[in-house]
Amino acid sequence: MTDAEYDLLDELYFVTPFRTLLDKTGLPAPELENLLRGLLEQGLVRSYWPDPDTELAYETTSFGAIARDAAYLASKEGLLQHNTR
């Protein structure tokens, strides 16, 4: 896990919208999208769209279309990796 992934997981203990993550991390939007994509592919993060209660299965082909409108939450595995680093 990279330092950037670790720092991002630190913000995902609660469902957090993309825009809030931009503000909290200070990362450029494309970089944040790439980090989220990587964490989703590893199963360390879950995405929620169109509301914070509806989990959306990660699909590589549609992620780019909704990435900035979705909210994110660390998965159980993500929290375990974050806490054991």
Image (tube, rainbow, N blue to C red):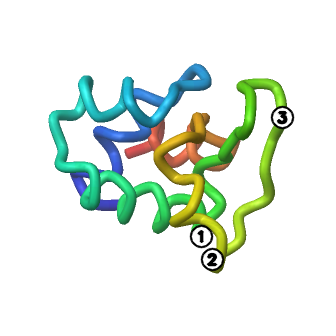
Answer above or below: position of 25 versus 14.
Answer: below
Label 1 vs label 2: CA separation? 9 Å
The residue tagged with tag 3: helix, strand or loop?
loop
Ranked by sequence position, the earlier of labels 2 and 3 is: 3
Q: Say the numbered circle drawn on residue 41.
A: 1
Circle 1 packing at 10 Å, graded few (<14), some (14-19), many (20+), is: some
Q: Are marks 1 and 2 in contact (CB under 8 Å)?
A: yes
Q: Say the numbered circle drawn on residue 60.
A: 2
The amino acid type of the residue labelled 2 equals Thr
**Residue sitting at 71 percent across and 63 percent down?**
58
Q: Say the numbered circle drawn on residue 79.
A: none
Quarter of the image for the C terminus: give it: top left
Circle 2 packing at 10 Å, graded few (<14), some (14-19), many (20+), is: few
The amino acid type of the residue labelled 3 equals Thr
The residue tagged with tag 1: helix, strand or loop?
helix
Answer above or below: position of 49 versus 64.
Answer: above
**Residue sitting at 65 percent across and 70 percent down?**
62
Circle 3 packing at 10 Å, graded few (<14), some (14-19), many (20+), is: few
Ranked by sequence position, the earlier of labels 1 and 2 is: 1
Label 3 vs label 1: CA separation? 19 Å
Name the side, left or right, on which 34 lies relative to 57: left
The amino acid type of the residue labelled 1 equals Glu
Counting labels gives 3
Quarter of the image for the N terminus: give it: bottom left
Q: Say the numbered circle drawn on residue 54.
A: 3
Answer above or below: position of 61 versus 39.
Answer: below
Q: Quadrant of residue 49?
A: top right
**Residue sitting at 36 percent across and 31 percent down?**
21
Q: Position of residue 37 (x, y in %)?
A: 49, 64
Which mark lies nearer to you, 1 or 2?
Answer: 2
**Residue sitting at 71 percent across and 71 percent down?**
59
